[in-house]
Every structure is written in structure tokens, then in C-alpha cells.
Image (cartoon, grey):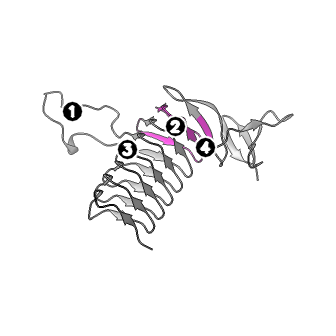
């Protein structure tokens, strides 16, 4: 199996694109970026130099993933979502000279397995989005997001929990710290602001 790259996409010759990955029109994948197998890179999406992307990741149209971001397997990045890399952005230094690559230190957004970033959400680096978490459309993430958390707003705050199916969990009757997925029936336990899957 090979990758499929549209003629109008720009993929640097030093980038690695995994088997079965599709790169759509006007997308740009920069030098030394690594994409796993089975990924979809939408129209106009951007993947910065050295970015690491796992298997079965979807970058929707015009998603911007700046280096040194790391996306684990199964991550979803919605349309026009942005993963930043500079906590103190400036075009020029204090003397007014244009800043270049070596004039600042890039910091990463890390998105763990199965997590989803909604359309037009922004992750302000450095930040980690936990496993299977869900960032609502338009949210601005300024601090780490726990596993399975549902976050929304500006700045993003936890408003609930979600399971692997992405559906909001419901509290189990008679179990104040027990949660259940209404779609799959999977059970979860909450302790000290964290959620874990029940064995």
C-alpha cells in the first residue's frame, strides 16, 4: 500500500508519509515531519518541520499543526484548529529586528491517543491534551486537559467527561464517582479530578 498525495500538495522530500495516508490539495508537510499510516491530511492543512503524527490521524481542512507538536494514534484535529508553538509570540526582538528561527524556543502541543480537537479550537503551547479527551469547537486550551475530559470555552474548562466513543458520559445512579457511556455501556471511575476506565 502506498500514500496518496494530490499534485497541488507540498510534501518536503525529507518528510515521511506512511502507507495508506492521503494528503489533499494545497496541504503542506514540512521537512522532517513524520506521519504514520492511514492518516488523512485535509485541504490546506499545515504540518510543521519535525512534527510527529501517529497512525490513523485526521487533520481536517486548514488545520495548522506547528512544530514541535506530537500527535498520537487516532487523533482528530478539526477544521481550522490551531496548535501553536510560541508562548510569547513576537515578530521582532526588543531592538526591533525581525526574529528568525533561532531567536526563540518552540514549545510543543502534545495530543494523546484518540483525543479530538473541535473546529477552530486553539491549543496554546506548551500544553497536553489527554487520551480520548474532547476539546469543543472554538475552545482555547491554555492548560493541560485530563484523559477523557470534555472541555469548552475561552479559556477551556472541563464541563464533563467523554468515553472512547466521544459521547458525554452519564453518572451512574447510586455511584457518585461512577460514570457510564450511554452508547457503549463502558464504565469509568472518577477520583481526584481524573477519570480511569473500569477494568
Dividing the picture into quarters, in which one does residue 82 lie? top left
Residue 113, magenta (yes or no): no
Quarter of the picture containing the N terminus is bottom left
Q: Residue furthest top?
A: 154
Based on the picture, tell me whether residue 129 belongs to the magenta stretch.
yes
SS at mark 3 in the image? loop
Residue at image position (34%, 48%) is 44
Choose the circle earlier in sequence order: 1 or 3. 3
Is tag 4's residue or tag 3's residue first in the polypeptide sequence? Answer: 3
Q: Position of residue 84 (x, y in %)?
A: 37, 39
Mark nearer the N terminus (1 vs 4): 1
Tell me, yes or no, whether the two marked residues, 1 and 2, touch with CB atoms within 8 Å.
no
x, y percentage for residue 41?
Answer: 41, 54
**Disc 1 target residue:** 91
C-alpha separation, residue under disc 1 versus residue under disc 3 = 23 Å
The answer to the question of whether label 4 and label 3 lie on touching residues, with beta carbons closer than 8 A, is no
Q: Residues within 10 Å of mark 4 (few under 14, many from 20)?
A: many
Q: Residue beneath label 4, please?
A: 147
Q: Which residue is mark 2?
A: 144
Residue 19's place in the image compared with 132, above or below, is below
Residue labelled with disc 3: 62
Name the front one of labels 1 and 3. Answer: 3
Mark 1 or mark 2, whichever is nearer to me: 1
Disc 3 + disc 2, Cβ < 8 Å? no
Between the residue at mark 3 and the residue at mark 2, the CA separation in whole angstroms equals 24 Å
Q: Nearer the viewer, residue 114 or 87?
A: 114
> Mark 1 to mark 2: distance in Å?
27 Å
Q: Which residues are magenta?
A: 124-150
Amino acid at each position: 500500500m502506498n500514500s496518496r498525495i494530490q499534485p497541488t500538495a507540498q510534501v518536503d522530500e525529507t518528510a515521511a508519509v506512511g502507507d495508506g495516508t492521503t494528503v489533499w490539495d494545497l496541504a503542506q508537510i514540512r521537512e522532517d515531519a513524520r506521519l504514520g499510516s492511514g492518516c488523512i491530511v485535509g485541504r490546506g492543512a499545515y504540518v510543521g518541520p519535525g512534527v510527529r503524527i501517529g497512525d490513523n490521524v485526521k487533520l481536517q481542512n486548514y488545520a495548522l499543526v506547528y512544530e514541535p507538536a506530537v500527535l498520537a494514534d487516532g487523533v482528530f484535529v478539526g477544521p481550522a484548529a490551531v496548535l501553536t508553538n510560541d508562548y510569547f509570540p513576537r515578530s521582532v526582538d526588543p531592538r526591533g529586528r525581525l526574529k528568525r528561527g533561532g531567536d526563540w524556543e518552540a514549545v510543543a502541543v502534545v495530543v494523546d491517543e484518540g483525543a479530538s480537537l473541535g473546529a477552530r479550537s486553539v491549543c496554546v503551547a506548551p500544553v497536553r491534551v489527554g487520551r480520548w479527551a474532547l476539546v469543543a469547537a472554538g475552545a482555547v486550551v491554555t492548560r493541560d486537559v485530563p484523559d477523557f475530559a470534555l472541555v469548552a470555552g475561552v479559556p477551556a474548562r472541563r464541563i464533563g467527561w467523554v468515553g472512547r466513543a466521544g459521547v458525554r458520559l452519564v453518572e451512574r445512579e447510586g455511584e457518585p464517582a461512577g460514570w457510564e457511556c450511554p452508547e457503549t455501556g463502558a464504565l469509568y471511575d472518577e477520583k481526584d479530578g481524573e477519570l480511569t476506565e473500569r477494568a
